Image (cartoon, rainbow, N blue to C red):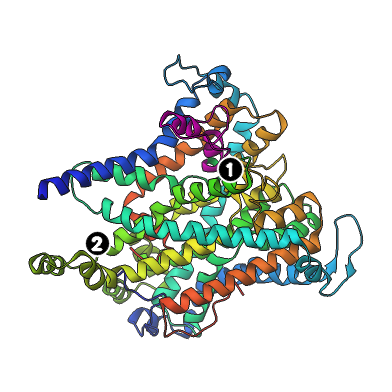
Amino acid sequence: MAQEAMVSEREGPATAVEAAAGLRDLWWRRLLFAPTIGLLLLLAIVPLLFSLGVSLFNYSLGSRAIWTGLGNYINLFTDPQFWLAARVTVQFTIAAVSIEVVLGILLGFVLNQRFTGMGIIRLIVFLPMMLAPFCIGLFWRFMFDQTFGIVDYILTRVGLPTIPWLAHPFWSQVAVVVVDVWQWTPFVALLVLAGLGTIPTELLEAATLDRASTWLKFRQIYWPYLRFPLLLALLFRSIDTLKLFDSPFILTGGGPGNFTSTLSILGYRHQIMFFNVGMAAAISWVVVIIINIVTNILVRLITPARVEQVATGL
Amino acid sequence: MKTFKRVLGVVLALLVAAVFLFPLLWILLSSFKTKLELLAVPPVFIFRPTLQNYINAFNSDFPTQVRNSLIIAISTTVISITLGSLTAYGFSRYSIKGSDFLQFWILSLRMLPAIAVVVPFYLVFRTLKLLDTHIALIMVYCLFNISFAVWVLKGFFDEIPIELEEAAMLDGYSPPQVFLKVSLPLARAGLATTAIFCLIQSLNEFLLAVSLTTRVADTAPVGLSKVQTLMGVDWGLLSAGSIVFMLPVVIFTIIVRNELVRGMSFGRMR
């Protein structure tokens, strides 16, 4: 089922179940859909439109909201802090996701072997992604500490110089990527593993008999079954790193010098620390639009036939 | 050659396991250290374990925060599974106008960044005097968990043979009875799996929690994030708290280990 399209193409089933639930049971159909759709509209569309409205006002909590039109957006686009946050966010996404996909494929093949104890190894590998990103960030901050951290200790033991992980602009960015890669490479591997599980054994046996080269084997046999899982992993990981908040917030608080401050952290700061609601709303809309564009591109790759607009909740 | 490859594979797998296990073990170990041992240079591996950090955690606000986390996560899960199973069943068995569009829209909620709803929810809850309450977080979490539940549960309902339901109809069951007495019981493993994923997601969430709660309804991660700013960094308390907080998630993960693909891919793969 790994090859299943994003949305089943099956038209509504004219089953006996449905036929019997004729007009008489119209209330039953309404009960199935109306509460959910209604609640989701209330919780997603209304807040998003509200925040679009707020983004057009110069509004700080405790003072009057003044209409400013695109003023917040103009301020935002002329603010070097915003461009730094946008650059940092995109850099994190490109670096983390590409490493995760490459290592994820390799990890998937490593975990695809069969021997006793593999079940436990898989469980260990898949555990980190289930844990709170907050806690993971905390652990790594403890391990990255410059004086008592275990990472630098190991580096010195193997004869390498210590690294100021969380205090240096470049190395703190590396640290954020390392943590994301550590937590989420298993996610890519999980989907790869599921994809590998769908390859018919005859196909693999035939390739072994033919003594096909490794690259040819990958291209001809594995790739068709890995395409969908990998695109799905790419989609989910890209979206999640574009909205990255927890781990850099805990690791560095966005520092040093805002060099690990993602768009989500910038928005949080304007909202919760500066009470600059209009600006926070504008930033959040920029994130929504960026994610929309990326989602649309990737979803088109996954299901080329579908042309419907996939908006982030809109 | 063949044995060499096999041995290499096993060694690689063990190495990988070590990479993912080590940080978790290191924190577990650290949670039993005294303040001095925690900050020792070079790090100590052999020491006399103490439970002091756990005692400190239980004598702080931490138990209340864990309670908040549990109340919010369980309420969210109950609402999400109830509404999610109705709609998932609807999508699976009935044809409605714009079904594909609706399903796609619900899927797209997975992409919605939390920061985008922080601002409006903050303002609305502030007006309604709901900031820093359980209800506020439950409502926001429902947004993300209902859409998740609909997609994952639809996959489970799709797997139930429709013949079973048709047989029940012939026995005179009405459509709601078929759903309650045939389909739901058949999908109970799926319901449990989905519920566990909803619980984990709600427990782990941080950005919305830290934005919408302060000190009455703050969840465990929010509480722990405050430890490090107010009293310097008490790593003993932080590691002990994290371990306690993560324990249920570890157990949940072991329970749903065979359905991880489905849960993590929003039901798009299994």
**Residue B98 in picture, x, y percent from top left:** 51, 84
A283 to the left or right of A303: right
Q: Say if labels 1 and 2 share a chain.
A: no
Q: Which is more toward the observer, A172 or A269?
A: A172
Type of the residue with mark 2: Gly
Q: Nearer the viewer, mark 1 or mark 2?
A: 2
Horizontal side of A220 relative to B213 (left or right) equals left
Give the position of the N terminus of chain A as an image quadrant: bottom left
Q: Is residue A150 magenta?
A: yes
Q: Which residue position holds label 2?
A: A197
Q: Secondary structure at mark 1?
A: helix
Q: Which mark is residue B69?
A: 1
Outermost top residue? B48
A68 vs B185: above or below: below
- Identified at 57% across, 33% down, the residue is A145
Q: Residues within 10 Å of mark 2 (few under 14, many from 20)?
A: some
Which residue is at a point 40% across and 32% down the rendered structure image?
Answer: A158
Which residues fall within the magenta stretch? A136-165
Q: Of the numbered discs in the image, which one, if any, rests on residue A125? A: none
Residue B201 in the figure: left or right of residue A123: right
Percent across and percent down for residue B251 are 40, 40
Any part of residue B220 in sight? yes
In this rendering, would A15 be left or right of B89?
A: left
Q: Nearer the viewer, residue B83 or B251?
A: B251
Q: Is residue B242 above or below residue B71?
A: above
User: What is the quadrant of the C terminus of chain A in the image?
Assistant: bottom right
